[in-house]
Image (tube, rainbow, N blue to C red):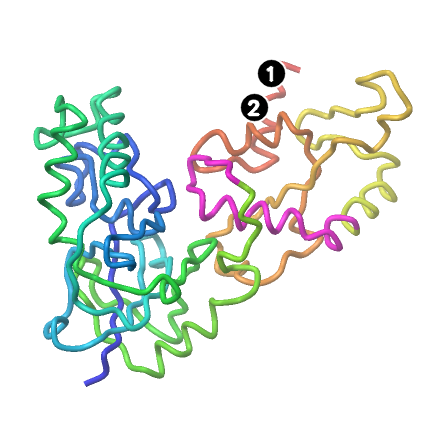
């Protein structure tokens, strides 16, 4: 039997690096407590045995007897999203170092601020939460060497021509070795891997993984330079397409001509048409304030949508 599976993880808006608020009461399994143990799957926490230990709500039969390769996914419409790959995963238990356990407990405790926790964790002290998390360590039974966890910089739509998710739940779904290899070949590209500039630490509502790839595409210098050149050729100067700010006029200085305006990737990154490289036509010119505003709501605004919002106040 081929030891290859697709497994869904519960949704997380922080790139599966830490828990976040706003999920209590949802219809997913984490809605009851507002917490999913998958929340730390991509936190790069090294356990006492020197390995990562991931939580998956379901694991395959005979997982304790053999190694497996997993395609990790997240539920989305219209297509499930691939978020990572785990290779040579084995069954194994360990414990978190005390400082990491305490950090996780503090992250959970912080969710009390807006009543985002259910009864199991809500209104408990950090120490009490740490005790609970320590007791639950047996759930983190997917043991993987750090080099074998491949995190995508952006969730990528599942290519239906290669693999179709047959069930929306958390059960491990079989796939062939060929399908696994084709999926890896399709999505593990230079512009969709975690080799993206790791200095980008902005965390917007869409999640850090998505934001990192988004920023990476906007930093594709050749495409950005060409987009700006064509914009200046057409319009004379760079200005914000949302609020119409023109730096030279706004600051009253010719030195600011064509400065500060940023190139924004205006095509939803979940769009199946944009698994590949950025095109000049994908980019819009925006000022830093509007750029931040676009990312401050969920889902992200398009430049046109922000322009429409600004019109009554202009």
Residue sitting farthest toward the right: 254
Which image quadrant is residue 223 in? bottom right
Of 76 and 19, nearer the camera is 19
Q: Quadrant of the C terminus?
A: top right
Of 196 and 223, nearer the camera is 196
Residue drawn at x 11%, y 53% as measured from the top left? 138
Give the side of residue 171 with respect to residue 314, left or right.
left
Q: In this picture, is 84 found above or below 95?
A: below
Q: In this picture, is 104 found above or below 43?
A: above
Q: In this picture, is 227 found above or below 257?
A: below
- The magenta region covers 201-225
Give the side of residue 139 with respect to residue 290, left or right.
left
Residue assigned mark 2: 309
Give the side of residue 196 with respect to residue 154, left or right.
right
In magenta segment, residue 252: no
Of 121 and 276, nearer the camera is 121
- Do the numbered discs 2 and 1 sit on residues whose CB atoms are within 8 Å? yes
Residue drawn at x 84%, y 26% as measured from the top left? 256
Mark 2 to mark 1 CA distance (whole Å): 7 Å
Residue drawn at x 65%, y 29% as measured from the top left? 288
Residue assigned mark 1: 312
């Amino acid at each position: 039997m081929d030891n290859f599976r697709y497994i869904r993880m519960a949704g997380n808006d922080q790139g599966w690096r830490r828990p976040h608020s706003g999920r209590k009461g949802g219809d997913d399994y984490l809605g009851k407590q507002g917490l999913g143990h998958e929340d730390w799957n991509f936190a790069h926490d090294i356990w006492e045995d020197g390995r990562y230990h991931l939580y998956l709500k379901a694991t395959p039969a005979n997982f304790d007897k053999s190694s497996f390769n997993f395609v990790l996914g997240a539920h989305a419409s219209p297509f499930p999203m691939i978020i990572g790959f785990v290779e040579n995963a084995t069954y194994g238990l360990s414990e978190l170092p005390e400082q990491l356990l305490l950090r996780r407990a503090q992250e959970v405790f912080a969710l009390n601020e807006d009543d985002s926790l259910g009864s199991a964790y809500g209104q408990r002290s950090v120490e009490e939460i740490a005790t609970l998390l320590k007791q639950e360590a047996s759930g983190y039974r997917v043991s993987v060497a750090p080099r074998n966890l491949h995190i995508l910089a952006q969730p990528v739509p599942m290519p239906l021509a290669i693999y179709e998710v047959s069930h929306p739940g958390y059960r491990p779904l079989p796939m062939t070795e060929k399908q696994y290899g084709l999926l890896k070949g399709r999505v593990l590209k230079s512009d969709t891997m975690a080799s993206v500039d790791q200095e980008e630490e902005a965390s917007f509502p869409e999640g850090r993984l998505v934001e990192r790839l988004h920023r990476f595409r906007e930093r594709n210098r050749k495409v950005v330079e060409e987009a700006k050149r064509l914009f200046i050729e057409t319009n004379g100067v760079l200005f914000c397409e949302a609020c119409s700010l023109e730096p030279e006029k706004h600051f009253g200085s010719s030195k600011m001509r064509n400065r500060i305006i940023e190139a924004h990737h205006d095509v939803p990154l979940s769009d199946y048409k944009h698994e590949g490289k950025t095109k000049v036509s994908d980019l819009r010119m925006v000022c830093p304030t509007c750029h931040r505003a676009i990312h401050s709501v969920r889902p992200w605004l398009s430049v046109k949508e922000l322009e429409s919002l600004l019109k009554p106040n202009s």
